[in-house]
Amino acid sequence: MAGLTRTAGAFAVTPHKISVCILLQIYAPSAQMSLPFPFSSVAQHNRLGLYLLSLTKSCDDIYEPKLEKLINQLREVGEEMDAWLTDHLTNRFSSLASPDDLLNFFNDMRGILGSLDSGVVQDDQIILDPNSNLGMFVRRCILAFNLLSFEGVCHLFSSIEDYCKEAHSSFAQFGAPNNNLESLIQYDQMDMENYAMDKPTEEIEFQKTASGIVPFHLHTPDSLMKATEGIPYGLLHNRKETSRTSKKDTEATPVARASSSTLEESLVDESLFLRTNLQIQGFLMEQADAIEIHGSSSSFSSSSIESFLDQLQKLAPELHRVHFLRYLNKLHSDDYFAALDNLLRYFDYSAGTEGFDLVPPSTGCSMYGRYEIGLLCLGMMHFRFGHPNLALEVLTEAVRVSQQLSNDTCLAYTLAAMSNLLSEMGIASTSGVLGSSYSPVTSTASSLSVQQRVYILLKESLRRADSLKLRRLVASNHLAMAKFELMHVQRPLLSFGPKASMRHKTCPVSVCKEIRLGAHLISDFSSESSTMTIDGSLSSAWLKDLQKPWGPPVISPDSGSRKSSTFFQLCDHLVSIPGSVSQLIGASYLLRATSWELYGSAPMARMNTLVYATLFGDSSSSSDAELAYLKLIQHLALYKGYKDAFAALKVAEEKFLTVSKSKVLLLKLQLLHERALHCGNLKLAQRICNELGGLASTAMGVDMELKVEASLREARTLLAAKQYSQAANVAHSLFCTCHKFNLQIEKASVLLLLAEIHKKSGNAVLGLPYALASISFCQSFNLDLLKASATLTLAELWLGLGSNHTKRALDLLHGAFPMILGHGGLELRARAYIFEANCYLSDPSSSVSTDSDTVLDSLRQASDELQALEYHELAAEASYLMAMVYDKLGRLDEREEAASLFKKHIIALENPQDVEQNMA
Amino acid sequence: MVSKECCRNEIRAAIRQLSDRCLYSAAKWAGEQVVGIEQDPSNFTPANTRFQRGSSSIRRRFSTNESISTPLPSVGFSQAATPLPEEDEAIDGDIYLLAKSYFDCREYRRASHMLRDQVSKKSLFLRYYALYLAGEKRKEEEMIELEGPLGKSDAINRELVSLERDLSALRRTGAIDSFGLYLYGVVLKEKGNESLARASLVESVNSYPWNWSAWSELQSLCTSIEILNSLNLNNHWMKDFFLGNAYQELRMHTESLAKYEYLQGIFSFSNYIQAQTAKAQYSLREFDQVEIMFEELLRNDPYRVEDMDLYSNVLYAKEACAALSYLAHKVFLTDKYRPESCCIIGNYYSLKGQHEKAVMYFRRALKLNKKYLSAWTLMGHEYVEMKNTPAAIDAYRRAVDINPTDYRAWYGLGQAYEMMGMPFYALHYFRKSIFFLPNDSRLWIAMAKCYQTEQLYMLEEAIKCYKRAVNCTDTEGIALNQLAKLHQKLGRNEEAAYYFEKDLERMDAEGLEGPNMFEALVFLATHFKNHKKFEEAEVYCTRLLDYSGPEKEKAKSLLRGIRMAQTGFPSMDLEHFPI
């Protein structure tokens, strides 16, 4: 707490600031003619001025460059007079032999300032206006120096010695660049070629000074204006470029590289100067974002940030936010004990009042601290580590405490977290936990199911967030609501009589509405954007860009395209969207994709995922990005066959396998299982099933999705192995589990599976009710694609009852055809085609000879699609049917061809081992 | 057992050597011990023995004379096998003496510079030691000069790097004595290289066991019993001192007491041992004994400030206002700028209910020593009293971060969070506290109360905690009563009766009375009557009759009911009687 009370505005004189002062002296020597000595042109003089302007601006940043770095930059700016500049700088430093010289130096500095009130200024004289940016900087330096005690001057003096010594030692290395520097040079030369087209005359010069730095040119005033405003020019440009052009597999790497490299750079920078409280808070905030975005992916090493935090803590023991960062870091590297420890420590020290901008500090009651936020964080931590019951306890307490202290903001967040917890974790019964505690709900809650509680909590949270104008929370609540509406049938909450009118349907319109409401965020987030954004860091980001090897080739001033692009970037920067906002909006796109997936529109799902991957891929957390990739890969597998899917999977694997709780492995297993089933390699399929089951945690109610998936696949494997009764058993128990944990959508697919099992086992009559039940489920949840495939199964069942039902089966099929052909995957389409052919063939009323073309056409379609899937069983059936038709038509050559195809598939089906070789 | 004479001679020589090397606190410690050895009455006149306690100056002159006159007799005990090192004083006499005087005048750098060309081990040690102290002094100054807006304190001892380099070079060449090894260990410890520091210190104490500073440094590096047991130490009576201290820090109080008891056989008048014993007894909560010990200690050594904060804690616990104020006054006059004195004054104000002033003095203590553990904890207590929970939590947390095994601070944290109505959050801290002190019933009871709060209402867990508390001999008798009540609440009358009986036994044994007693008696009487055990019920009823008030009436009606049930109306429904 002490850290907060101290003043935040300390401006200390540092060696770096003294070098800036020295340069300022060169720029504006007192009493000189129009152009001071070393400058050969006004442009050159201006360039130095602009450089100094950016330096002074970046002085508010947390890092200060070392002398060596400064000299490097000077080389770029100074062009032919760089040697003179650096010499002057180092000489000036070495002339500081005693503290008294410092005193004299600052006295001299006073001379370069013009007097405040003198109106008469000669035209050719260069005077620093005391009210200009540079003038203010000089004045601040002088003032800060004058405030120093003698001990302070001594410390400054000794730190100047260190500053120069470091530069000298690195000068030695500078002549002979080491390995990584060389690679930078290569980059550099690439850029240079680009550049050479525009300005061939300067080429030679640049070759000479090339030492790992990108050419830096800012000739025109307006481009400079923007540059000094601190556009991270190269970075943004780079992002735009890659995200526009790249396919999904190449994207996001450059960004990760860029940000990790800046981080690395900043971590390596050992001369860390402590700055004002606010600056460090802002800096730490950025770091926190970085941790969140990169999670525990390999590009981001948690130990490096750990050592950095250690260093920071040693320097600033009163800065408690370090503990919070450490907690975040540990959270993302899955270290439960350290995370817990640091979280508690942070809240013990800060009382929850440091660094949280949920509520402006004036409104919160400072006397009590805000420990309820600690509870909220603790609850979320338990949630993440998979302790739902503990998390629920803690969150319940958070609700109570925030009510007690009337911290509505925290309450809203807590309720949202709680509903999130309840909806994510399959908790069979919460009566013991929730009922007793949350008073607004208690009266009605005791008899409610978990789902209804989630609904109430969400509504409650949304209401509060809305009234408190917490835009981000409102948005994420809308998204959660959409998710809820997507998965659950709306029921009236309070009337529970048997005759109460119920709409047994989910409402896609309301889902859409909620998602849109969620996305409104982007238009009005600015009102609560963080107060911690700092001018300084942007300026220094720009300065850093000097060194970015992949920075943009300089665009020549007279090209027409430049204007629009810089304008765009400027706007882009001015409304720079906070990471959390763009994450939320990205999440809304992912949710859109998921909902379309469920409703059965493959193209829409794909489109939304692509939108997400291209626009939000760089700002999203790694787990979200992974999800998008996986969705796309799944799409590929369904619509393009396995070959493409596996190729894409390989790319994803490289990228995401290091992410904790990675779902890549899961998807891989799913794809392998699918493929093994299709190829008829049942042993492999069974093995993969077991592996899938092994991925899930053993705790009750956790990882429900995974468990359902595993047993669903087990039932399918058993079905493929023709062990019908066992398959039915598994499916039945699965249905019971789904019912217990209220997994409605899974219920529909389990019912369909049961129908399938009965169909295959030849009990078409038994299968019918299951198929019908599945259809009704699909209807109430608007699962159109699943419904189409259930209809197909139903039709198959009808046909299984005898050929006299052909007409009815065909009618059913034709009803479902638009959906199947428009959105269905390869397998479903092939099945539909084959079934259609089957119907025609078995229909006694129609003869093959009359409309053989329709039959053959659909069969050909089917076998083409099955080829891609390597689904031998169905493919064999298709070729068999084809052969039959050809036989009837008397086209013997084609019949033989089809027959040989049939044989090939049958052989492949019987020898699945061959296929297994090239599978892994 | 080592002979007293042998110990005495060893220490006497060691004192000279230690103070020759300006290791004053070690010399002071050794001096205290040599005075603590009981004098052989045959060698001394009664006048001497009268002076034995308190006026050490006379005897010290006497003893040093003696030790010079008699050569060191090596008595054939295996424990005292370490020979005293030879002195090479004659070689560097003058310069060394001058450097030592500089050192004594706290001109460390000058002393170090004076010895720059000397090669004897002794002057090498003093040279590096002076340099180290110079660095420390500069560090302290810088800490104040550099204090930035965020409590920045990156001041370091700038000499450490060169010291480590030089000392390790010396060690490689073998030109280092045990004192140098001690200094090397200290430097390594400051640099964070603990295992190497431990090795160096072990080597030092093995070759020269009388340097208590080395032992103390070694002790601070033994953070667990495993580390302690893994040390390869030669047997020497100094090791017993070390072990006693180390056991105490590792909260193995009985082992520590045993060590000190053994040592008291030799050093029967040692103030140090007495204070350490008192410390251990304090941890075992034997306040009366501790008070007596401290009183005696103060009689013998009235200007002692060390460990007196502990005495003030005892006085605080016993609410002895006058004695505490007397103690505070005395230490204030002795040395008011010692953290201990500030702490004692803080305790006094706290006892008087003037918490703001108490906090002020604890703050002053902390200013003098930022790592003064008990001041942080006590300040936390004060803030709790002042209902400033965030500040209390902050203070406790600092204590915990200084020493993570401080169960009082963990307990305080739990308490503070419980006060704020966050019992579930508090549980974590109570658990931590209990982890370090599993045998304290108070902690278990606090935890049980947490579970019992209406917010959590986890009675089963509360019962478990109370059971543990009972097993730890709960002196205040809360646990038994609560157990009985909880069982009663949960409708388990058998268990409730069992615990009520036990509670009754306890109260009888301690001769206590009160509402708890009535409650127990009424419950037991009713319970036994309901179960038709009329004799037991009668016993309890008659006991109740001894007291006046509503309980008496209740007992009467119960007795009536029992009579009725016994005679004639066995089938009569019990509910018909007013119970």
Image (cartoon, rainbow, N blue to C red):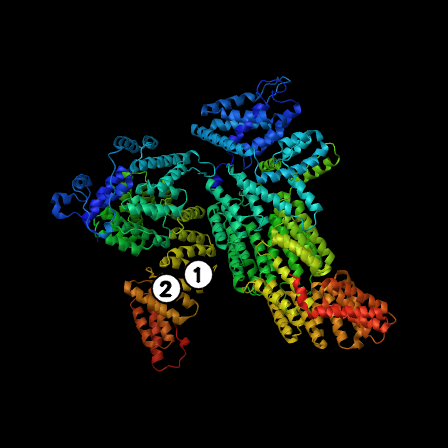
Cβ–Cβ under 8 Å for marks 1 and 2:
no
Q: Residues within 10 Å of mark 2 (few under 14, many from 20)?
A: many
Instruction: Give the camera-side residue of B75 and A89.
Output: B75
Tell me the chain of label 2.
B
Position of residue A47 in the picture relative to residue A150 (left or right): right
Q: Are marks 1 and 2 on the same chain?
A: yes
Instruction: Give the camera-side residue of A454 and A580.
Output: A580
Residue drawn at point x = 44 percent, y = 34 percent:
B146
Tell me the chain of label 1.
B
Name the element at disc 2: helix
- The location of residue A746, given as percent across then percent down, is 65, 65
* Residue holding disc 2: B481
Q: Earlier in the sequence, mark 1 or mark 2?
A: 1
Q: Residue furthest front?
A: B173
Q: Report, in whole angstroms, how far the alpha carbon at label 1 lies from the one at label 2.
A: 14 Å
| Observer able to see residue B444 | yes
Q: In the image, what residue type sits under mark 1? A: Gln
Q: Residues within 10 Å of mark 1 (few under 14, many from 20)?
A: some
The dot on residue B452 is: 1
Corner quadrant of residue B361: top left
Q: In the image, what residue type sits under mark 2? A: Asn
Corner quadrant of residue A49: top right
Labels in figure, total: 2
- The location of residue A677, given as percent across then percent down, is 67, 67
- The location of residue A79, given as percent across then percent down, is 63, 28
- The location of residue A57, given as percent across then percent down, is 58, 32
Residue drawn at point x = 40 percent, y = 62 percent:
B465
| Observer able to see residue B301 | no
Does residue B494 lie above or below B145 as drawn? Answer: below
Name the element at disc 1: helix
- Which image quadrant: the C terminus of chain A? bottom right
